[in-house]
Image (cartoon, rainbow, N blue to C red):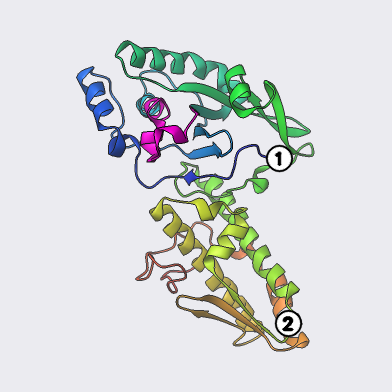
Amino acid sequence: MVRPIYSPLISYCQEKSYYSDKLLDLRLAARQAQITMHDLVRPDVVLTHEGDRKFAFTECKASSFGPTSSTAEQARSLLLVAGPRAAEALGLAPGDISESLLAFVIPHDEQKLLGPTVSNLRGELERNKLPPAHSSFLGLQLTDTDVSVVINDLGSAFFALPAGANAFMKREPDTDPRPLYFIPYDPDVVQSEQERVFCKRVLFERMHSTVLSAVGRANPPAALVLESRKILNDAMFGAYEHWENRESAKHMRRLCTQFMNALMQAVNSEAPGSMAFQVGEGWSIGLPDQEHQDTVTDALSRFSCETLDLRAEPQPGLFDDLEDGGPLSGGV
């Protein structure tokens, strides 16, 4: 993998919109110019290069879109958010940002189709004295040997990467790279049911590996405590820590509880009383001796995420606003 130039996410699925909350004058000016925009808007990701004070407002799209589509309304708003008023939108001092842009991550074969649309939207804003951001396109390209991001000249200068294809993941022919995603499952992404089930299974399998690894590394006698925050961060390479949309984060904790309750049931059927849940603390696993550790490890190893009902959604609970707030109703 290419070493990331930009720091981890400073915002993922931001809970509050930037545009409607911080840039009300631009919203009013757009309305007076009869330009249709989203009242609520937030980029998927904001990346920052702390040394250079550069900010990339990043929006992921599965396909191109036209200038009259509802998606274009969102793009207009994002062009304003990521433009000269970006510092204000993020609640920073003007000097805290040296440069910003709006980057669209899109399949490479859709890249050329999206360019004219964004150019059209930028021109529309400029004609109405609404300052848009510069924009770049990061095209995802899959080959038999790797996954690459294809960057245009503006993106090359901003991200300090060569223009053209930059491979960031190796792959074998006829293999599926999706299990390697940093964030395998996102409740806010619109997916087919089949895709959603697949992504949820990948998330559960990573959580399973986290628990199995923790038990395997323990030195009995030991009492492990696994918190939902740790489990989810391990499953998403630390991305959960930066998840600011409270409702989405809450949904992820419900999924973690849903999975861990099923795992706890499987372990306790083989080694009664080994796993328990404590409100506000997480899941404890008692390993009094080597023999007991072997039994728990064996039970964990035989557990399969494929036996779970991956279409079942976790139900709200009384303590959803707390980390490890308590068992949630419903099951896997």
Residue 234 pos. (x, y %) = 62, 59
Please state if 295 lies on the left or on the right of 201 as rendered. Answer: right
Residue 185 pos. (x, y %) = 54, 50
Rendered view: 57 above or below 134:
below
Q: Residues within 10 Å of mark 1 (few under 14, many from 20)?
A: few
At a point 61% along the width and 62% down the height, the residue shown is 207
Which badge, 1 or 2, is on the more N-terminal residue? 1
Give the residue type at disc 2. Answer: Gln
Quadrant in which the N terminus is drawn: top right
Give the residue type at disc 1. Answer: Arg
Residue 57 pos. (x, y %) = 48, 33
Is 285 a magenta residue?
A: no
Q: Secondary structure at mark 2?
A: helix
Q: Secondary structure at mark 1?
A: loop
Q: Which residue is mark 1?
A: 3
Rendered view: 96 above or below 303:
above
Rendered view: 291 above or below 88:
below
Closer to the observer: label 1 or label 2? Answer: 1
Q: Nearer the viewer, residue 264 or 247?
A: 247
Is 91 a magenta residue?
A: yes
Span highlighted in magenta in the image: 78-100
Q: Residues within 10 Å of mark 2 (few under 14, many from 20)?
A: many
Q: Which residue is mark 2?
A: 293
Please state if 245 lies on the left or on the right of 145 as rendered. Answer: left
